[in-house]
Amino acid sequence: MAEIRVLPEKCVGCRKCLPACPYGAISMLGRMAVISEACVFCGACVPACRYEAIELRLPQTVQPNSQARGIWVFAEFFAGQFKSVTFELLGEAHRLAASSGEPVCAIVLGEQAAQSYRQLWAYGADEVLALPTAKLDQRDELLYPLALAQLVQAYQPSIFLIGGTGFGRSIAPRIASRLETGLTADCTRLEIDAQSGLLQQTRPAFGGNLMATILCRNRRPQMATVRPHVMHSLAPDISRRGSLTYAEVRLPENNLIQQLDLRLTTSESLSLESAEIVIGIGRGIGSPRTLPLFQDLAKALGAGLAASRAVVDLGWLPYAHQVGQTGITIAPKVYLAFGISGAVQHLAGLAEGTYIIAVNKDPQAPIFQVADERVVADCIPLAEALLSMAKPKPKPERTA
């Protein structure tokens, strides 16, 4: 682990280090500089201190494990089926394997999930490594990282891909921490570097204003989480066959988390991530009093209901509805956006190829720059008119 500290016996309070820090991580406490948790250990402050009062210790370089081989995909299983992002990652891993020449291995935890291993072959897995333990049928955010870390240590893959679902985002950093390797979150592009053979992991940075490509040079496996609907799955081939290996790990006798009840979140029950039509609402709808109108419209159209971060932050809808860089990614055929300005962070949650119909009173709204259809109008009357058209008309009564 990197470590940085201010040496109190050398610091004279000259404040020269404050403007040197590009992250604003240094402040003054009396006449002494203090470095906060915002520090990323870039080292810019060290040469700025003429009194050598800042000490930076970086971890020693570790040579990558030359024996590491294989592209792993965590096969997330929930409510009796694999998450769709599992198949997307298998498709992407299959493409990466064409460049690296490494086998694609799907990792399955739990007795129930292990029974569906043939489906993973069909979607591109060359190998399935299963841990058919009933204790793992319950998704445990502490037990899963323990089991997966042991599997990585035993089989030593080169790359480990995990879906950027709520559960995947929770377990991935725990696994990376146990293995003391790097993790790139929310990747939108993966490539094998032709010269080094390293995995190039590309993700949005600085609020989506630029794309950063990250390499994990000295640790294995190279770990990444990938948002759902960003990659493309292969067409399933039910005749495809691979290998199946059952593994064993040491687990504590009792579950680390006790599950009292299981209830589907709103996004799960509405299948928001798989809906072909999604209605998105932003702060431009005016107030939460108009929310029932859009809920009724979504129901009438058989659509999912999404929201911008502003709507969620205001408490109008729960987080499960939030689409964007800090929410979920969706891939509907049609996205009908009401009162959404179209910040780049929100648009990052829409998969490529989505047909966007934007409704906004502001003709200069940024969403109009990317929308396929633009409607400059008040959201409420238009939504009311659409709802009236979508509702089934009562049949006229026959008179004898």
Image (tube, rainbow, N blue to C red):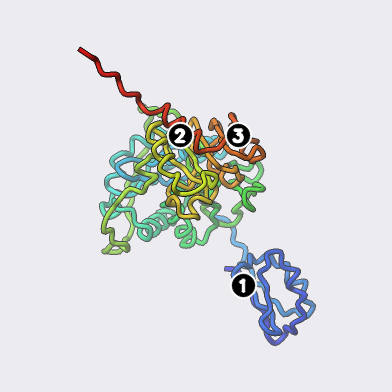
Does residue 13 sit above or below 239 in this rendering?
below
Q: Nearer the viewer, residue 273 or 193?
A: 273
Residue under the image location 33 percent in, 53 percent down: 139
Which residue of the protein is positioned furthest toward the left in this rendering?
400
3D distance between C-alphas at marks 2 and 3: 16 Å
Q: Which residue is mark 2?
A: 384
The residues tagged by marks 1 and 2 sit, at their Cα atoms, a distance apart of 51 Å
Question: Which sits earlier in the primary sequence, circle 2 or circle 3?
Answer: 3
The amino acid sitting under disc 1 is: Ser
Q: Position of residue 161 (x, y in %)?
A: 48, 47
Report whether 84 appears left or right of 357: left
In the image, residue 255 sits, relative to residue 355, either above or below, namely below
Kind of residue at disc 3: Val
User: Residue 75 in the image: x percent, y percent?
Assistant: 39, 44
Residue pictured at 31% horizontal, 39% vertical: 116
From the image, tell me which residue sits under label 1: 36
Q: In the structure shown, which secondary structural element does the residue marked by tag 1 occupy?
A: loop
Of labels 1 and 2, earlier in sequence is: 1
Q: Residue furthest right?
A: 50
Most extreme residue toward the top is 400
- Please, which residue is most extreme toward the bottom here? 9
- Amino acid type at mark 2: Glu
The tag on residue 398 is none
Mark 3, residue position: 376
In this orientation, does residue 161 appear? Answer: no
- At mark 2, the secondary structure is helix
Horizontal relation, residue 238 to residue 70: left or right = left
